[in-house]
Image: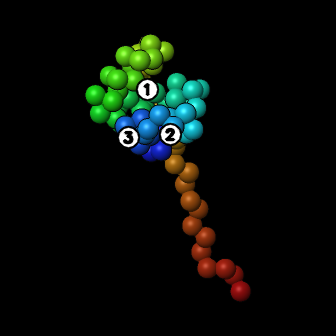
């Protein structure tokens, strides 16, 4: 996600074409739009109405953390 945030905010045209995937961008836009500046968000949503249509979709919840099971010292 941090790659997308950086490329959206600072990427050159070549970076956008090489590093962004349309389906991934659409899937993660509700979350990405709150991670980038309002200016970046506005520019992208103005250019791509598909992104603007996702403005009211709540951001994705982070995946649940898996609990690590502590393994005691190995039995000898």
Can you identify the residue that label 3 sits on?
Answer: 10
Give the quadrant of residue 22: top right
Asked whether the viewer can see residue 71, the reply is: yes
Looking at the image, tell me whether mark 1 or mark 3 is earlier in sequence order.
3
Give the quadrant of residue 27: top right
For the C terminus, give its image quadrant.
bottom right
Q: Which mark is residue 17?
A: none
Residue at the (33%, 30%) spot, across then down: 40
Q: Nearer the viewer, residue 10 or 67?
A: 10
Q: Residue 30 carries which label?
A: 1
Q: Which colour scheme is used?
A: rainbow
Neighbour class for label 2 at 10 Å: few (<14), some, many (≥20)?
Answer: few
Q: Which SS class for mark 2?
A: helix
Residue at the (67%, 79%) spot, across then down: 74
Q: Which SS class for mark 3?
A: helix
Can you identify the residue that label 2 sits on?
Answer: 15
Q: Nearer the viewer, residue 18 or 61?
A: 18
Q: Label 2, label 1: how many angstroms apart (C-alpha)?
A: 21 Å
Q: Do the residues labelled 2 and 1 touch (CB within 8 Å)?
A: no
Q: Where is residue 12 in the image (x, y as percent from the top left)?
A: 44, 38
Residue at the (59%, 26%) spot, across then down: 23
Looking at the image, tell me whether mark 2 or mark 1 is earlier in sequence order.
2
Q: Where is residue 71 in the image (x, y as percent from the top left)?
A: 61, 70
Give the quadrant of residue 43: top left
């Amino acid at each position: 996600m941090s790659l997308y945030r950086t490329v959206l905010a600072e990427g050159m045209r070549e970076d956008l074409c090489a590093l962004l995937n349309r389906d991934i961008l659409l899937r993660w836009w509700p979350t990405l739009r709150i991670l980038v500046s309002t200016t970046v968000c506005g520019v992208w949503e103005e250019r791509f109405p598909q992104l603007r249509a996702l403005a009211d979709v709540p951001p994705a919840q982070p995946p649940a953390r898996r609990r690590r099971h502590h393994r005691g010292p190995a039995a000898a």
